[in-house]
Amino acid sequence: MKVRELTASDIALFSRLIMDSSEFDTLTDLERRECESALTAAKAVVEGYTGLDMATTEQEDLAYAVKVLAAEMIDSHQITAQYTGKNPVAMQIMDMHSSNLLPSVEV
């Protein structure tokens, strides 16, 4: 699955808010909006970190990183000042595809 194919229902399923994608409509409006917001935010994080366009990338493993980050956003509604950790699964996937953090050599 590619990042552009992910839906809020996929995020709800991955986050275990639902056990089957057909149950998405049983969520409250707030829960559905939360999944949509988490999906949008997670895509932005991955896009910003890697420098890749999430609408066109063919890297299927980045979809998993988006799901991991979105689920973490749903699980952790707030982050305290003591929290300095980064999800190692998402970071490992994003590091493999990062194109905007490499130093460039000018000739």
Image: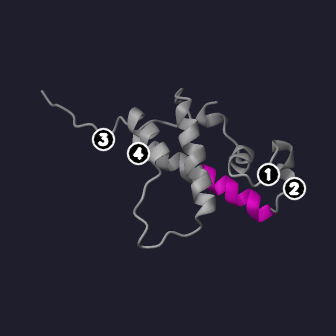
Q: Residue 6, relative to residue 42: is it above or below?
A: above
Q: Residues within 10 Å of mark 4 (few under 14, many from 20)?
A: some
Residue kind at label 3, given as amino acid type: Leu
Say left or right for 35 vs 21: left
Q: CA distance from mark 3 to mark 4?
A: 8 Å
Residue kind at label 4, given as amino acid type: Tyr
Give the magenta part as a residue range. 29-39
Q: CA distance from mark 2 to mark 4?
A: 34 Å
Residue kind at label 2, given as amino acid type: Thr
**Residue bearing the label numbered 3:** 101
**Residue bearing the label numbered 2:** 26
- Residue 90 coordinates in the image, percent (x, y): 49, 44
Q: Residues within 10 Å of mark 3 (few under 14, many from 20)?
A: few
The residue at the point 41 percent across, 71 percent down is 82
Is disc 4 in contact with disc 1, using a CB cutoff of under 8 Å? no
Comparing labels 2 and 1, the label whose residue is closer to the camera: 1
- Residue 85 coordinates in the image, percent (x, y): 42, 59
Is disc 3 in contact with disc 4, using a CB cutoff of under 8 Å? yes
Magenta stretch contains residue 72: no
Q: CA distance from mark 4 to mark 1?
A: 29 Å
Q: Please report whichever mark, 4 or 1, sits nearer to the chain's N-terminal start.
A: 1
Q: CA distance from mark 2 to mark 1?
A: 9 Å
Q: Please report whichever mark, 3 or 4, sits nearer to the chain's N-terminal start.
A: 4
**Residue bearing the label numbered 1:** 18
Q: Residue 27, relative to residue 22: is it above or below?
A: below
- Residue 96 coordinates in the image, percent (x, y): 40, 33
